[in-house]
Image (tube, grey):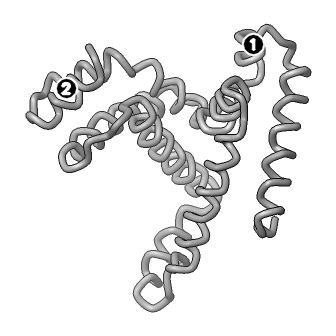
Amino acid sequence: MEDERIIELYWLRDEHAMAETARKYGAFCTAIAGNVLSDRRDAEECVNDTWLRAWNAMPPQRPRLLRPFLGRITRNLALNLWEKNHAQKRYAGMDLLLDELSDCVPSPKTVEREMEARELGALISAWLRTLSADDRRLFLRRYWNGESLQDLAAECRQTPAELARRTYRLRQALKTHLERNGVTL
């Protein structure tokens, strides 16, 4: 089913939207969650939460492209779950203490930090637009989707070592671009 039709199902509040989304993008979202979480059950939970988030987001949102919209939701949910799982292993009580202190300690999120994050995002997006389609796809699949060098190398018909050098050069180019634009690393 075409993405426009799936989005329309969400807007009509038709429950078939989630089934069609799962059928078309289940493997994609599971791969993203699996790359972040490395646990099949956690990845499945994350993907199911993605369908619910998409349901709750549409309407009012109407994504232009469904695949990256779902990928972003999945990635954010997976990263949040990863942080939660790792925080519990270190010291779960700290989260409780920080929650208790939240009423009297200012939030680390500030307007200034939000603006810096947006500016950084804009700089990275501008840099990505300067890359060839192959390099842009490689960079996003490696650093946004979290795909392994081995899997990417097999698809690109390169050795993992060659691909590691290529991704290193891309990272260095990004670093140079950011530094030229005033970002302190």
N-terminal of the two: label 2 or label 1?
2
Which quadrant is the N terminus positioned in?
top left
Rendering quarter of residue 145: top right
Reply above or below: 67 against 153: below
Tell which tag, 2 or 1, sits nearer the viewer.
Answer: 1
**Residue 35, quarter of picture:** top right
Between 33 and 6, which is closer to the camera in this rendering?
6
Left or right of 133, for residue 98: left
Amino acid type, label 2: Ala
Picture residue at 25% right of the left edge, 19% below the top: 20
**159 or 65: nearer the viewer:** 65
Residue at image mark 1: 156
Q: Secondary structure at mark 2?
A: helix
> x, y percentage for residue 134?
70, 23
Amino acid type, residue under disc 1 in the picture = Cys
Image point 18% across, 45% down: which residue? 59
Q: Position of residue 160 (x, y in %)?
A: 85, 19
Q: CA distance from mark 2 to mark 1?
A: 34 Å
Which quadrant: the C terminus?
Answer: bottom right
Residue 65 in the image: above or below residue 154: below
Residue 80: x, y in percent? 50, 51
Residue drawn at x 53%, y 24% is 31
Residue at which label 2 appears? 17
Residue 60 lies, with reference to residue 146, above or below; the image says below
